[in-house]
Each structure stands twice: as C-alpha cells, then as structure tokens.
Amino acid sequence: MTRHFLRDDDLSPAEQREVLERAVRMKQDRWGERPLAGPKSVAVIFDKSSTRTRVSFHVGISDMGGSPLIISTASSQLGGKETAADTARVLERQVAAIVWRTYAQSGLEQMAQGTRVPVVNALSDDFHPCQLLADLLTMQEHKGELAGLTVAFVGDGRSNMGQSYLLACATAGMHVRVGSPAEHSPEPDVVAAAQRIAAETGGSAIVVHDAPAAVADADIVVTDTWVSMGKEAEKAERVATFGDFKVDQALMARASPGAVFMHCLPADRGFEVAADVIDGPQSIIWDEAENRLHAQKALLAWLLERNAA
Ligand code: CP
Ligand code: NVA
C-alpha cells in the first residue's frame, strides 16, 4: 500500500520523529541527499493561491535533484473537467509524487485512492500537515524537546491550522490547547482523534472558548488568519466574532515568560495578531517560513524511501 500524507496523523509518533530528525540533517547539509536525481518530476498542483508552499516545494524538489512541475488548476483539466482519480492515473506514470493544495479533504482522498505514488496534502479546508511539520521543526529549534511543551493555538479552531495543530502536536506528545469561539470549534472527530493520540504519547488536547485560558503559561502561542481561503464572503462576520481572540501584548503576557509566537503566514496585522507581537522579539515566523523547505524535503525523501521498500 502506498503511503500518503493527507493529514497529520498519517504519521505515527515514531514516524513523525524520523521525518523531523531527517529534516534537521537535511537543513544542515542542504544538497547532500538527491533522492529525485534523474531528474524525477514531482507534480505540485494549486487550486488556491500560495507563496510559501509553491516556492518551498519548487526549491526543495530542485535541491533533491528533481524537476518540479507546478500546475495551476485553472489552466489544467482538473477542477470540474476531470476527476482527481483520473488525473492521478495519468500523473502516477510520469511523476514520483503528487502534491496538491485544494478545498475538500475528500478530493485528496480520491486522488490517493489506489494511486501508486505518494499524494501529499499541501493544504485543504481541513488540514495543513506540511505546515505543521515545519512548525514542529521550528519549535524544536527554539524550545528543545517537543514532548511536554504546551502550545496554544488561538483563533479559528475549525480551520486547517487549528485542526492540524491538534493532531500534529498530540502526535509529538505536546499539550495542545485550541482557544476559539464556540461556533468555530474544531470538528469533534478531530478533537477525539487528537485525544486518542495524546493518550498514547503522554500529551493532551483540549478546546476552550477563552483566549487567556488557552495561552496561560504556554511555551508557544500560535494564530492564523480569521478568514481562510474560501471564507472571504464571511469576512465581516468573522472579524466581529473573533475580536476577543486577537494575539496582542496583553495576551502574550499571560504565556510563559520565554514564550515564542508563531504564524504560518500570510498574516493580517491588526486583526488576528498585533503588529508589535508578530514583528517583535518573541516572533519566530521567518524561521518557521524557511522550515517549510527543510521539513517538506524530509517528508518527500521519507515517503519515496518508504514506498520503494
Ligand atoms: N503558510 C502557507 O502555506 O503559505 P502560502 O499560502 O503562501 O503557501
Ligand atoms: N488557514 C489559512 C492558511 C493559509 C496558509 C487558509 O486556509 O487560508
């Protein structure tokens, strides 16, 4: 069975550690591993806009000796004209892996179903697991051993980032708290999955509807846009609803004194985060953005090796 990476818990705790250890090595020796030498191609498909994901996959595939094939859905047959399954049948005979940023998680599942090459979720409405690998790598660099750290995600708990934080941090043995308005809580099945994983790893996963309670003594404070791609029509309503969940200096003061601030970007300064927090001394967002490159290279190298075995 081909291994894919469609959600954060597709990697077991031991596998997540392996990928992160590999990312550390690949960051230290950027051109040392060339699993895509040939060059082998990797298709990277975008139904939604992107800067970081597009650049980091393009550069990472090139670093590993491969050829990135960046496809915009609007100029392809995918997206109404051809199914994800038919697209995968065509691509799998020519590329080493398929990376896809899309809307519905079910599209990724259809793409992966029966496909011989790994399919990687480059963001869906439900999860952003590549971002979480980069975020875990960044936390490890700044805070050391992940297991036992407390991380607070404040904002849209039902977003791809809120839900990925629950799964990925529980897998890493962390204590993860999501602080969101009640009507934007993560899906109950995602919370339950995170709690099952946390019971194995020694971590914990909870959802609260109070930002100060979420960040109390946290080692890491994270937020993301209140208006994810696809939700633009709800902007006014969301800005009104999320007002108490803004990360500002007063909220950061409730976290642990050495706490760091993270954001996957792009950011709306003045909305989900105050400018003096995201641009201040606790912010580690530029390391986080760079680590997309190293984490995704490690993930692709790991998946290619697993699927060859
Ligand atoms: N964080 C992130 O995925 O950024 P892009 O939308 O620019 O790819
Ligand atoms: N939650 C955001 C992440 C962007 C990288 C979105 O889906 O738009």
Image (cartoon, grey):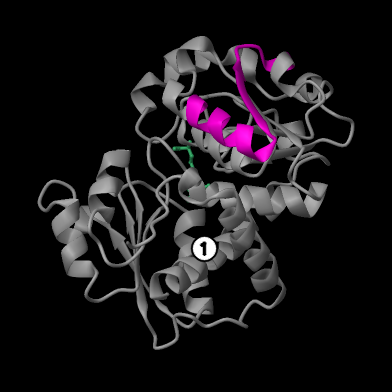
Near-viewer residue (195 or 273): 195
**Type of the residue with mark 1:** Leu
Asked whether, in this view, residue 166 is left or right of residue 222, the answer is left
Q: How many marks?
A: 1
Part of the protein shown in magenta: 191-212
Q: Residue at x 34, y 63 (%)?
A: 2
Hey, which quadrant is residue 96 in on the image?
A: bottom left
Q: Residue at x 45, y 66 (%)?
A: 303
* Residue 182 image point, x, y percent: 51, 11
Near-viewer residue (233 or 80): 80
Asked whether, in this view, residue 64 is left or right of residue 111, the answer is right
Q: Can I make out residue 172 in this image? A: yes
Task: Give the answer, above or below, for where 141 lies relative to 183.
Answer: below
* Residue 252 image point, x, y percent: 79, 26
Q: Can I make out residue 78 in this image? A: no
Question: Does the segment drawn in magenta span residue 211?
Answer: yes
Q: In the rendered view of the protein, which quadrant contains the N terminus? A: bottom left
Question: Does the segment drawn in magenta span residue 166?
Answer: no
Near-viewer residue (149 or 265): 149
Q: Residue at x 42, y 53 (%)?
A: 5
Judging by the rendered image, the residue that carries numbered circle 1 is: 299
* Residue 215 image point, x, y percent: 74, 23
Residue most toward the front?
Answer: 200
Near-viewer residue (302 or 222): 302
Q: Residue at x 47, y 64 (%)?
A: 57
Residue most toward the bottom?
Answer: 38
Residue most toward the left?
Answer: 81
